Image: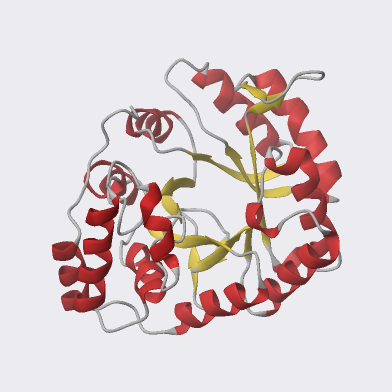
Amino acid sequence: MKTNRLGRSELSVSEIGLGCMSIGTDEKHALRILHEAMDLGITLLDTADLYDAGRNEELVGKAVKGRRGDVVLASKVGNRRVPGQDGWVWDASKAYILSAVKDSLRRLGTDYLDLYQLHGGTLDDPIDETIEAFEQLRREGVIRYYGISSIRPNVIREYVSRSNIVSVMSQYSILDRRPEEEVLPLLEANGISVIARGPVASGMLTDSGESKLSKGYLGYGEEELRAFRSGIRSAVKRPLAETALHYPLAAPAVACVLAGASTSEQIHANVEAARRPPLGAEELAAVRSAVPANVYAQHR
């Protein structure tokens, strides 16, 4: 599989990464998916301490044992669980980040992370303190690089101007073109890569996704989504999921598309789609004509 450099880092990531949240908690099943992903050339494995209360990190750690050097291991921090309470609270403090990384490393069975990401963020956070935590971890060799996972343009701007992030994980798909106006140009100009999540829009941009349209998506209703799917299929003579996976990769700032998979068949389908030629200029123009660009409104 083709690989791309992640920002100005020394990390090389496969064009298709695995969003590990989708692998489930059954160990045998999860390890099979993870091993197949690595065998097929997927190098970026993205997890978080939040997923399944840390169980996801444990499973990823078991899968990469003996293969640690073959993968770019990424995790995320910021959602702190409170003992005795349901759910979690947001905590971007330096003290919490320095503490949480130790637990993630223990669960993952490694002494360093290739990429450590802030799992969200707002303008109300102690941003300088948050950056200090990541910079300290980098100096200590606990992490190689850091980034943020955010869909908030104003937060992204702060980290671009004040930190050494190498990546921004952001939702980006044919149905969510919001990053195109504000985020992608900013990151490209600063040598920071995008890890695009949600490429198939919760399954709506797959051949079997028509049944999901009734739920709506980003303010679009079922009939609009049905029209979008039809328009994309008419515009590009490829399987719908293949078009969806390749669309974000056409943006120069995008280094990797993060696709989830809960079955072996999905892993193989994602990898096969990635091996197909990229979308051409005419195909991209046709897709953009079929689905209008939306813009960020609430998430600032």
The spot of residue 109 in percent (x, y) is 86, 51
At horizontal 46% and vertical 15% (from top left) the residue drawn is 124
Q: Position of residue 201 (x, y in %)?
A: 41, 56
Quadrant of the rendering where the C terminus is positioned:
top left
Between 132 and 120, the residue placed more toward the observer is 120
Q: Quadrant where the N terminus lies?
A: bottom right
Kindly identify the residue that appears in the image at 34 percent across and 78 percent down.
278
Residue 127 visible in the picture: yes
- Of 22 and 296, the residue lying toward us: 22
- When the figure is inspected, residue 138 is found, relative to residue 197, above or below; the finding is above
Q: Residue 66 occupies which quadrant of the picture?
A: bottom right
170 up-or-down from 60: above or below: above
Residue 214 in the image, given as x and y percentages of width and height: 37, 52
Q: Nearer the viewer, residue 87 or 150?
A: 87
Q: Relative to residue 59, is residue 252 drawn left or right?
A: left
Across and down, in percent, residue 176 comes to 31, 50
Q: Quadrant of residue 143?
A: top right
Q: Is residue 249 above or below residue 40?
A: above
- For this view, does 255 lie left or right of residue 68? left
Tag count: 0
Is residue 46 shown to the viewer in this render?
no
- Here the colouring is secondary structure
Residue at 50% in and 57% down: 6
Q: Foreground: 27 or 179?
A: 27
